[in-house]
Image: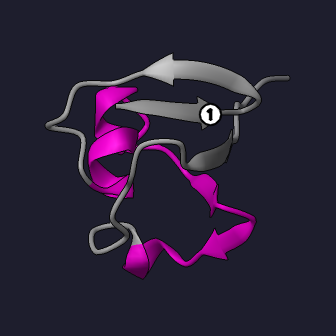
Amino acid sequence: MKLIINSDEVQVDETVATVEDLLSHFQLDQKVAIVELNKEILEKSKHAEARLANGDVVEIVHFVGGG
């Protein structure tokens, strides 16, 4: 399945069916991440039920600590 993630076209396996799966795929599931799916910000509680489709536009912002 082709997705546009942070302005880049990315091919992901068909097993990546939800936003939760996508975050896990990119090893971001244990981090604080804000996800926008097709210009709609998703609450974290919706990640498991938000289904992905070919051509979806996803923006992911995650926080990195530092000093």
Residue for badge 1: 4
Judge left or right: residue 28 versus residue 62.
left
The quarter holding residue 9 reads: top right
Task: State the SS at label 1.
Answer: strand
Q: Is residue 46 above or below residue 58?
A: below
In the displayed structure, would residue 61 be above or below residue 12?
A: below
The residue sitting at the front extreme is 54
Position in image of residue 65 (x %, y %): 72, 31
The magenta stretch spans which residues? 18-46
What x and y, as percent, mark residue 32? Answer: 56, 52
Q: Quadrant of the N terminus?
A: top left
Residue that appears at 33% across and 64% down = 51
Q: Residue at x 53, y 42 (%)?
A: 55
Residue 34 place in picture, x, y as percent: 64, 57
Residue lying farthest right? 67
Q: How is the image coloured?
A: one colour
Residue 38 percent location from the top left of the image: 66, 61
Please tell me how crowded label 1 is: few (under 14), some (14-19), or many (20+) other residues with Cα within 10 Å: some
Query: Who's the residue at 47% across and 72% down the image?
Result: 44
> Is 25 rendered above or below residue 51?
above
Q: Is residue 50 above or below residue 23?
A: below
Q: Label 1 sits on what residue type?
A: Ile
Relative to residue 64, is residue 67 drawn left or right? right
Q: Which of 33 and 7 lies nearest the eye of the viewer?
A: 7
Which of 35/8 is in front?
Answer: 8
Q: Magenta segment: does it hold 37?
A: yes
The quadrant in which residue 60 appears is top right
In the shown orientation, is residue 62 left or right of residue 67? Answer: left
Residue that appears at 40% across and 26% down: 26
* 14 inside magenta stretch: no
